[in-house]
């Protein structure tokens, strides 16, 4: 199987988020600390979603730092640099809001088949990116970013619909807007580099 086929088979994270990062100039208001009552089931699901977003932020930061060093295109390097910084900042905010709302945000549960699948995919994507150079690396990284952002938007929309806490809903809505902006930017970078060959 060629590296390019492997790259595009492994590219989409189930729910990943290079795009979860807010740009340094886009600040999200912290919700007040007083949480509204959530059912235990809703709290558990939201804790799981925040844990997934946390794992995605960490992996996205790692991949972006890798791309900042290894990308061939200056456009990709610049994009990756902004993502690495913004993802770290976004993850801090995610953890802070999770704590304020009494959510258990931590490592993914290896016993959960969905979490295990996500971890396996992230490991495979790291191996794949490490095996590529030049244009192949750039295109695979940017494709991964784009697919990840689309997956994250779907996750955020679902969680926003299920959330009972108004402040969590507002935060998730703001994240959807940020991720959509990042998706637009990543698609713009890909179009500038590859034109119609994307």
Image (spheres, helix red, strand yellow):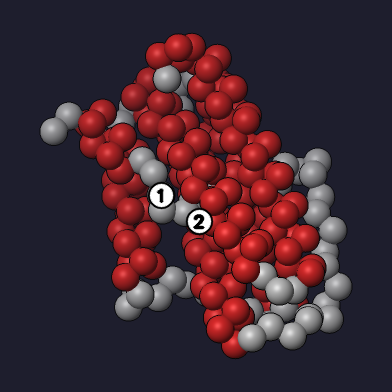
Tell me residue 89's x, y (percent).
Answer: 69, 54
| Residue 10: quarter of image | top left
Depth check: 82 or 52 in front?
Answer: 52
Left or right: where 117 falls relative to 102 = left
| Residue carrying label 1 | 13
Tell me residue 192's x, y (percent).
Answer: 55, 14
| Residue 72: quarter of image | top left
Looking at the image, which residue is at 36% across and 66% down?
114
10 Å neighbourhood of mark 1: few (<14), some, or many (≥20)?
Answer: many
Asked if one can make out residue 42 in the rendered structure from this viewpoint, the answer is yes
Tell me residue 15's x, y (percent).
Answer: 47, 54
Left or right: where 10 falls relative to 91 = left
Looking at the image, which residue is at 79% across and 44% down?
26
Q: Determine the secondary structure under disc 2.
A: helix
Looking at the image, which residue is at 54% across and 67% down?
49
Asked if one can make out residue 92 in the rendered structure from this viewpoint, the answer is no
Tell me residue 174's x, y (percent).
Answer: 75, 52
Q: CA distance from mark 2 to mark 1?
A: 9 Å
Which numbered disc, 2 or 1, marks the residue closer to the eye?
1
Quadrant location of the C terminus in the rendered image: top left
| As drawn, 134 above or below 89 | above
Q: Determine the secondary structure under disc 1.
A: loop
Depth check: 85 or 120 in front?
Answer: 120
| Residue carrying label 2 | 56
Depth check: 34 or 23 in front?
Answer: 34
Quadrant location of the N terminus in the rendered image: top left
**Residue extending furthest left?**
1
User: Going from the N terminus, do you reach mark 2 or mark 1 first?
Assistant: 1
Depth check: 144 or 127 in front?
Answer: 144
| Residue 41: quarter of image | bottom right
| As drawn, 142 above or below 153 | above
């Amino acid at each position: 199987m060629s590296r390019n086929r492997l790259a595009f088979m492994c590219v989409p994270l189930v729910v990943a988020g290079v795009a979860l990062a807010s740009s340094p100039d886009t600040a999200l208001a912290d919700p007040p600390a007083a949480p509204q009552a959530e059912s235990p089931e809703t709290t558990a699901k939201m804790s799981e979603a925040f844990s997934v977003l946390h794992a995605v932020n960490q992996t996205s930061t790692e991949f972006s730092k890798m791309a900042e060093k290894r990308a061939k295109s200056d456009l990709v390097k610049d994009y990756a640099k902004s993502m690495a910084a913004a993802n770290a900042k976004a993850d801090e905010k995610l953890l802070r809001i999770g704590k304020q709302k009494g959510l258990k945000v931590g490592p993914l549960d290896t016993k959960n088949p969905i979490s295990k699948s996500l971890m396996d995919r992230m490991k495979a994507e790291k191996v794949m990116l490490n095996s590529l150079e030049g244009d192949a690396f750039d295109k695979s990284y940017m494709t991964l970013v784009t697919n990840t952002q689309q997956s994250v938007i779907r996750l955020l929309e679902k969680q926003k619909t299920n959330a009972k806490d108004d402040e969590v809903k507002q935060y998730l809505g703001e994240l959807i807007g940020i991720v959509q902006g990042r998706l637009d930017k990543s698609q713009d970078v890909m179009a500038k580099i590859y034109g119609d060959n994307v």
